[in-house]
């Protein structure tokens, strides 16, 4: 079973959002997503400073099997990306909610966070996909 | 419902991620595709290839029939057990499938064809076989396990008892019967090893004994990156019914001599050769980070030159590699379009990796 940490927010295209103490958010792909994609070999990261709309393509994760777009769960400005993924894309597989994070965003409209799925909602979604 | 091989339960017990492959429920990997790839390059791995179709062709005129049916010439097969890689062509010279044919006796040849093309292959072969009085018998009572890697042969020898010395003496692309086992020194990885056909009921036991001997299970995912590194074509990607062997890097498998031998597709190939071959297969290596994928477009000097037929990431080399079909003889630098951006790549001659070693550094 894929891990779905209770403290995160999710969207149905399998990204997670972790609100930080300073008001920014950390974003990555879920354990379920990395499991579907298989071994990562390349992550195409966004440029810091880029301003994203909610639902906009912002990165690409490439496994041996396929390339998959990563969508920004909320609107905001990219303030940091996980440079470690350039040399070690497999961090997305090994630790999708920790060292495998993809980017940090300064939310344009923090209230958007309230519209995202909680852990129960996301767990129900992936359970439904399995059937 | 998808078809299952005799090793289906073994795959589930090993925690395999199962996927549909040509109508079969097959293991993609057992945890990490890249790790499995390295195991085959460095030690030994085993693949369930029981989904592939084995067909025995029998009859007094079977050699004459195959001389006509196949683009390579079975007259190269003079010693029982010898194998030959060949295409089977349609009248337009397009590739219906690629296969390995084994010479068993003057009354019996064995073919191994792809799983996804089973129905059309058997229909085509049977249709042409009737005129030669040759019978086509599918051997779905057999399973097939490939054991590949630098340590593969020793691992297999340890399981064969008295037959081991005979198997160890097999030259590449030769096969021999050892009791109920048919053991061939062939493969699809660029490493040494065997492909073993055996009664389906014995498959799970043999698989377990291989595992106990230290051979690791390898999924179809690694099988694809291994064959790509080895510069081996995949049917349906690198060639199909709309491309000929001459434009797919398979010209070496077409036996033109003797000129008097007629085979299905010969006239079309000769006409193409007379007009001039305008398409050619090359290898590509991506200079920067990223991954090459099937159908990405290739540009030389800013102009369209063709497209990638098989692209992936090479675990051995740590970079993306591909086979591509280009519109002309080309060398040196090119560009690949990836998500709207042109990225630099280099044209090389496959294979990329053989016996665990890079073949492209000196190119």
Image (cartoon, coloured by chain):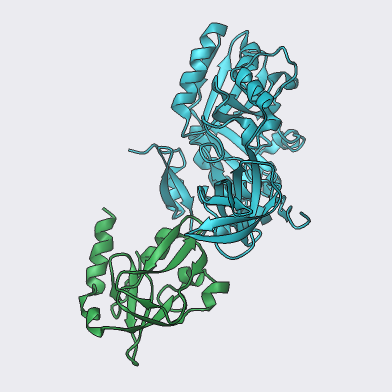
Chain colours: A green, B cyan
Residue B159 visible within the image: no
Which corner quadrant of the image does residue A30 belong to?
Answer: bottom left
Q: Is residue A104 left or right of residue A65?
A: left
- Identify which residue is drawn at 69% across, 46% down: B330
Q: Is residue B74 above or below residue B355?
A: above
Q: Can residue B271 be seen at all in this image of the molecule?
A: yes
Q: Quadrant of the N terminus of chain B?
A: top left
Residue B268 is situated, as x and y percent measured from the top left of the image, at: 60, 21
Viewer-proximal residue among B243 and B196: B243
Q: Measuring 74% from the left and 34% from the top, which residue is drawn there?
A: B170
A99 displayed left or right of B195: left
Query: In what quadrant of the picture does the C terminus of chain B appear?
Result: bottom right
Instruction: Say if B143 sits above or below B59 in the image.
Output: below
Please give left or right for residue B282 compared with residue B8 in the image: right
- In depth, the one of B176 and A42 nearer the eye is A42
The spot of residue B201 in percent (x, y) is 48, 34
């Amino acid at each position: 079973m894929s891990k779905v940490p209770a403290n995160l927010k999710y969207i149905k295209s399998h990204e997670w959002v972790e609100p930080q103490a300073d008001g920014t958010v950390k974003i990555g792909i879920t354990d379920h997503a990395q499991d579907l994609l298989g071994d990562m070999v390349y992550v195409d990261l966004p440029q810091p400073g880029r301003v994203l709309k909610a639902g906009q393509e912002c990165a690409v994760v490439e496994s041996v099997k396929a390339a998959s777009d990563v969508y920004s769960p909320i609107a905001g400005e990219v303030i940091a990306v996980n440079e470690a993924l350039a040399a070690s894309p497999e961090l997305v597989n090994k630790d999708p909610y920790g060292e495998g994070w993809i980017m940090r965003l300064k939310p344009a409209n923090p209230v958007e966070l309230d519209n995202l799925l909680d852990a129960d909602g996301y767990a129900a979604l992936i359970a439904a996909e399995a059937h | 419902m998808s078809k299952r091989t005799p090793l289906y339960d073994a795959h589930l017990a090993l925690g395999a991620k199962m996927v549909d492959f040509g109508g079969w429920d097959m293991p993609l990997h057992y945890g990490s595709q890249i790790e499995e790839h390295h195991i085959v390059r460095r030690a030994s791995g085993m693949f369930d290839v029981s989904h592939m179709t084995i067909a025995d062709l029998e009859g007094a005129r079977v050699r004459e029939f195959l001389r006509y049916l196949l683009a390579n010439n079975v007259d190269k097969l003079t010693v029982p057990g010898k194998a030959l890689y060949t295409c089977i062509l349609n009248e337009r010279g397009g590739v219906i499938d690629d296969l390995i044919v084994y010479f068993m006796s003057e009354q019996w040849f064995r073919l191994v064809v792809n799983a996804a093309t089973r129905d059309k292959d058997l229909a085509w072969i049977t249709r042409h076989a009737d005129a030669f009085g040759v019978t086509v018998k599918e051997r779905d009572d057999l399973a097939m396990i490939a054991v590949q890697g630098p340590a593969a042969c020793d691992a297999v020898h340890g399981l064969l008892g008295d037959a081991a010395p005979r198997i160890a003496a097999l030259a590449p692309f030769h096969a021999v019967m050892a009791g109920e086992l048919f053991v061939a020194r062939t493969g699809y990885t660029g490493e040494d090893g065997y492909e073993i056909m055996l009664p389906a009921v014995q498959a799970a036991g043999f698989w377990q004994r291989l595992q106990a001997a230290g051979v690791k299970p390898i999924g179809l995912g690694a099988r694809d990156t291994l064959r790509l590194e080895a510069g081996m074509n995949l049917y349906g990607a690198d060639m199909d019914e709309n491309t000929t062997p001459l434009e797919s890097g398979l010209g070496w498998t077409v036996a033109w001599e003797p000129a008097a031998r007629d085979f299905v597709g010969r006239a079309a190939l000769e006409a193409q050769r007379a007009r001039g071959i305008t398409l050619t297969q090359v290898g590509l290596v991506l200079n920067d980070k990223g991954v090459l994928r099937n159908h990405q477009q290739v540009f030389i000097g800013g102009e369209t030159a063709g497209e990638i037929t098989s692209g992936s990431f090479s675990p051995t080399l740590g970079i993306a590699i591909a086979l591509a079909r280009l519109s002309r003889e080309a060398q040196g630098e090119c560009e690949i379009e990836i998500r709207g951006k042109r990225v630099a790549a280099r044209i090389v001659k496959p294979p990329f990796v053989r016996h665990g070693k890079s073949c492209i550094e000196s190119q």
